[in-house]
Image: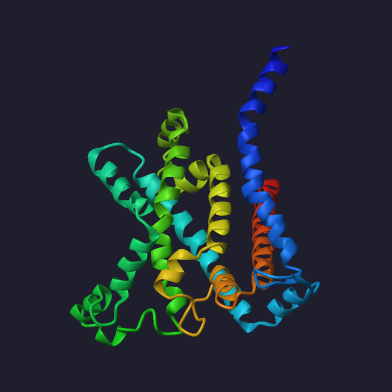
Amino acid sequence: MNALRSRRFIWMGLGPTLILYALFVFVPVIWSAYYGFFNWSGIGEAKYIGLGNYAEILRDPVFWRALKNNVIFVAASVFGQVPIALVLAVLLHKSNMLQRFLRSAIFLPMVLSTVVIGMIWQYIYHPQIGILNFLLDALGLGSWKLEWLSDRGIAIYSLIPPLIWSYVGLYLIIFMSALQNIPGEIHDAAKIDGASGGRKLVSILLPMIKNTVQVAVILCISGSLKSFDLVYIMTKGGPAHASELLATYMYNSTFTTYRYGFGSAISTTIMLISLLLIGTSQWLTSRKKDAS
C-alpha cells in the first residue's frame, strides 16, 4: 500500500511537467516532421510532395557544407570542451581562494548573453582594431594577421575558440561535482601507491566518472548540432556559406524564403543526424565497457 501511494505521489508530481514537455517538445517535433512532406509557405494550403523536400536537401551543396561544418563543431566540442574541462576540474577541485576565483572566472561566460559573447569575439577578431592582430604585430608576427571572420578558409575554425570558451565552464562544474563524489579513501590509496598526475587521472579518476563523461559527450553532440546564435551573431553563416551550420541553414531556408515545409524537413534531418551521432557514441562507449 505504501509503495502504491508513493508511486501515485510520484506520478502526481511528474504529471504536469510531463504534459507540458509533451505539448511543447514532442508535439512540435511530430508536427514539424509532418510538414516536412509538404510544400508550405506558412499560410495557405499545404501541398503534399512526399520526400521532395528531403531529396532537395540531399542535392543542395549548402546542406553538405553545413553538415561538414557541424561535424567540425561536434569534434571541437567533444575533443576540446570535455578534455579541457576535465583537466581544469582535476586542477581546481580544491577550495582555496585562488581556485575559487579561477572557477568563477571560467564559469563566467555561462552567465553572459550569447550576443555579448559574439560581440566580444568580433572585437577580438576585428582586422583593424582587434586585439588578436594587435598581439601578432607586437610579437613580430604581422605576416600571420588575417581576416579571421571574412576568410572563407578559416571562418569556421575561428568560431571554435568562442564555442569552447562559452561552454567549458558548464562541463567544469559537472566534472567537479563528479570528482567530489569520489571517496577520499580512493585518493589516499592512490597516493600510497604512488599514482599522481596523469596516471591518477587515466587509471583511477576517469574510470570512476566515465558515466559523467558519457553524459557530457552527449550534451556536447546535441548542443553542437543545434548551435545557432553564436554563429549567426558573428558571421550569419558567411562568407559565402563558409561557416554555415545546419541550424543557420534551416533558419535561412525557412525565414528568408518562407519555405516552412522545407525548413521542417531540415529540422527533422537535424534530429535524425543527432540521434545517429549520439547512438554511435553510445555504441562505441558500450563496446569499450564490454572490452574492459
Front residue (pair 252, 164): 252
Total numbered badges shown on the rendered structure = 0
Q: Which sits in the foreground, 181 or 19?
A: 19
Q: Quadrant of residue 140?
A: bottom left
Left or right: 12 as drawn, with respect to 54? left
Q: Residue at x 60, y 37 (%)?
A: 17
Q: Quadrant of residue 12?
A: top right
Residue found 29% across the figure and 50% down from its top: 105
Position above or below: 83 against 35: above
- Classify residue 58 as left or right of residue 72: right
Image location (x, y in percent) of residue 113: 37, 57
Quarter of the rendering occupied by the N terminus: top right
Query: In the image, 223: left or right of 194?
Result: right
Q: Residue furthest bottom?
A: 143
Instruction: Say if 20 sits above or below 257 in the image.
Output: above
Residue at coordinates 40% horizontally, 36% vertically from top-left?
191
State how the image is colored: rainbow
Compared with residue 196, is residue 130 higher up or lower down, i.e. above or below? below
Residue 132: x and y, percent?
Answer: 27, 74
- The answer to whether residue 205 is above or below residue 46 is above
Give the residue at the far top of this rendering: 1
Give the farthest residue toward the front: 44
Apparent side of residue 125 relative to residue 269 in the rendered image (left or right): left
Where residue 275 sits: x, y (%)? Answer: 68, 58
Residue located at (35% from left, 54% from top): 112
Residue 61: x, y in percent? 63, 83
**Front position in the image: 221 or 199:** 221
Toward the viewer: 87 or 149?
Answer: 149
